[in-house]
Amino acid sequence: MTTLQAIVMAVLQGLTELFPVSSLGHAVILPRLLHWPIDQKAPDYLPYLVVMHLGTAIALFLFFWRDWLSFLMSIVSPSSPRSSADRRVFLMVVLATIPAVIVGTVARKILGDAFGSPMTAAIFLIVNGFILFAGDKIAGQSVGVLDQLNWKGALAIGVAQCLALIPGVSRSGATIVAGVVAGLQHKDAARFSFLMATPIILGATVHEAPALLKQGATLGGAALLSGVVAGIVAYISTAILMRYFNRHEFEALNPFAYYCWAAGAVSVALIALT
């Protein structure tokens, strides 16, 4: 992988990890469309992925640092006025991460191998569009706030997150849809989705670390640069999305559904013709 390719993929990661359009699907499709000979089994590819995802997780933590500080204070100072609500939201985040940890540990490689072809990812990108579109239609105009999320809703969001193990299905998209179907406003569903993303991405990074140590992998300049680029783009993407969901409630996911349909259909056609 060249430096330019690494930077392009980092920008793509920073954008699509948070926008509900599937970062994994784009990472599978784009190299195929551009005819980039990227070897995912190359010794320098895993460190590149790990650093890039770490940059994304750090960006999310920095954007929502007040939430994480509130969670910590709710445990350290349980008698503060907001402690009960903050502690409850934190427990919902923990509960929602459990399904992905279990399923990801057991089935991530199987699902990746089974659904990881560019054509399949492009088809599931179209499916992702239907998930986004149908979610808004089912939810209507939800009015619930994050403090009202119960354990059933949190668990449903966590189960929905497991769909992102299939390239083409967006993690943020599936969890935001599950959130609005559970009754949350789009902005609260997005906030919960992004809070969930931090431990999930960090956990995946830690999970891959032993493999890096075992292989004796070293971090090249391109990998470090990609991590910084992915982090900066992810921070900007989060700010844009939170601003968007604060201003748009009715059918807020529809534009992303239209994009997934168009991008998926064009990708299917181009892959079939080449």
Image (cartoon, helix red, strand yellow):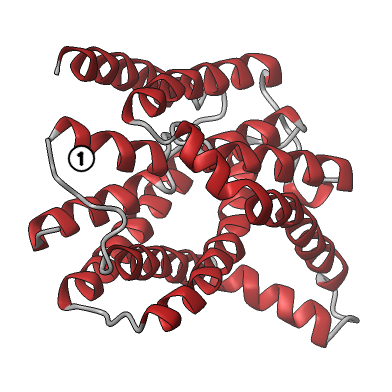
Tell me if residue 71 comes above or below residue 118 in the rendering: below
When the figure is inspected, residue 177 is found, relative to residue 257, above or below; the finding is: below
Quadrant placement of the N terminus:
bottom left
Q: Quadrant of residue 220?
A: bottom left
Quadrant for residue 51, please give it: bottom left
Pick the residue in front: 98 or 107.
107
Q: Residue at x 53, y 35 (%)?
A: 173
Image quarter where the C terminus lies is: top left
Image location of residue 130, percent across then percent down: 52, 16
Q: Position of residue 224 (x, y in %)?
A: 24, 75
In-image side of 270 versus 203 (left or right)? left
Q: Residue at x 62, y 21 (%)?
A: 135
Residue that numbered label 1 is attached to: 31
Q: Nearer the viewer, residue 204 or 212?
A: 212
Is there any visible trace of residue 246 in the rendered image?
Answer: no
Binning the other alpha carbons within 10 Å of mark 1 as few (below 14), some (14 to 19) or many (20 upward) gives: some
Mark 1 is on which residue type? Pro
Residue at the far bottom: name it. 76
